[in-house]
Image (cartoon, coloured by chain):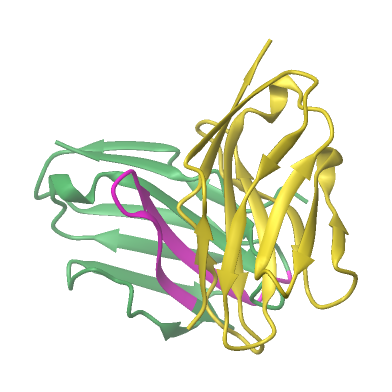
Amino acid sequence: DAGVIQSPRHEVTEMGQEVTLRCKPISGHDYLFWYRQTMMRGLELLIYFNNNVPIDDSGMPEDRFSAKMPNASFSTLKIQPSEPRDSAVYFCASSVDSREQYFGPGTRLTVT
Amino acid sequence: AQSVTQLDSHVSVSEGTPVLLRCNYSSSYSPSLFWYVQHPNKGLQLLLKYTSAATLVKGINGFEAEFKKSETSFHLTKPSAHMSDAAEYFCVVSGTGFQKLVFGTGTRLLVSP
């Protein structure tokens, strides 16, 4: 199995631009999680899906952030408009039973 | 609510010496506990998990952890450190039923030759 796949691995964009991060979970996993990691705040859960349905988005910082999961093999996290404080590493993770989560390699986002 | 406290932000050891990374947890329920490792510029990898079976849990790469309910601890150990063990380690707790995973602040393990 290829594991959780994230793209792009690195993204550099200017403030105000739209950013879309992509994730392909492990086949057969029915939970998908989006996390953000920063030095200041550590790992934060942004949102998670079960069977493609958003269950808890209480960690999404602002309305500028949105996430979708149109099918079992694809999810996106969108930031519009982006701001420098959004600079972080964004991880996607998937799991079968929602506890033992498998993480992707992350997307390092830099907003200038 | 569940929480974990990693007692050391940094731990330094010499190659070949034992490793001890400390974690205390707080949980209203019988918890599930995990240790994840993150190597530089990599994602998080599950090292081991405790889910109410044996209290001594063996993981990958020679790591193990012991669940001690009386001490609310779940410390990670390894008999002999290797240079490749240098990484950030996260203690994580989850409650019964689905609960969000709650991550500790991490412990950076430094291994010197």
**Where is B1 relative to B34, above or below?**
below
- For the point 44% across and 83% down, the residue is A54
Q: Residue B92 in the image: state x and y as whole percent.
A: 59, 63
Q: Nearer the viewer, residue B2 or A112?
A: B2
Chain ID for yellow: B
Q: Residue A104 in the image: state x and y as whole percent.
A: 57, 50
Q: Which of A99 and B113 is in front in this view?
A: B113
Q: Report the side of B32 relative to B6 (left or right).
A: right
**Where is B59 relative to B73, above or below?**
above
Chain ID for green: A
Q: Report the side of A77 relative to A62 (left or right).
A: right
- For the point 17% across and 73% down, the residue is A63
- For the point 41% across and 83% down, the residue is A56
Magenta span of residues: A28-48
Res. A67 in view: yes
Q: Nearer the viewer, residue A24 or B29?
A: B29
**Where is A66 relative to A110, above or below?**
below
Quadrant for the C terminus of chain B in the image: top right
Q: Report the side of A23 relative to A97 (left or right).
A: left
Q: Residue B95 in the image: state x and y as whole percent.
A: 62, 82
Dominant secondary structure of the residues highlighted in magenta in the image: strand
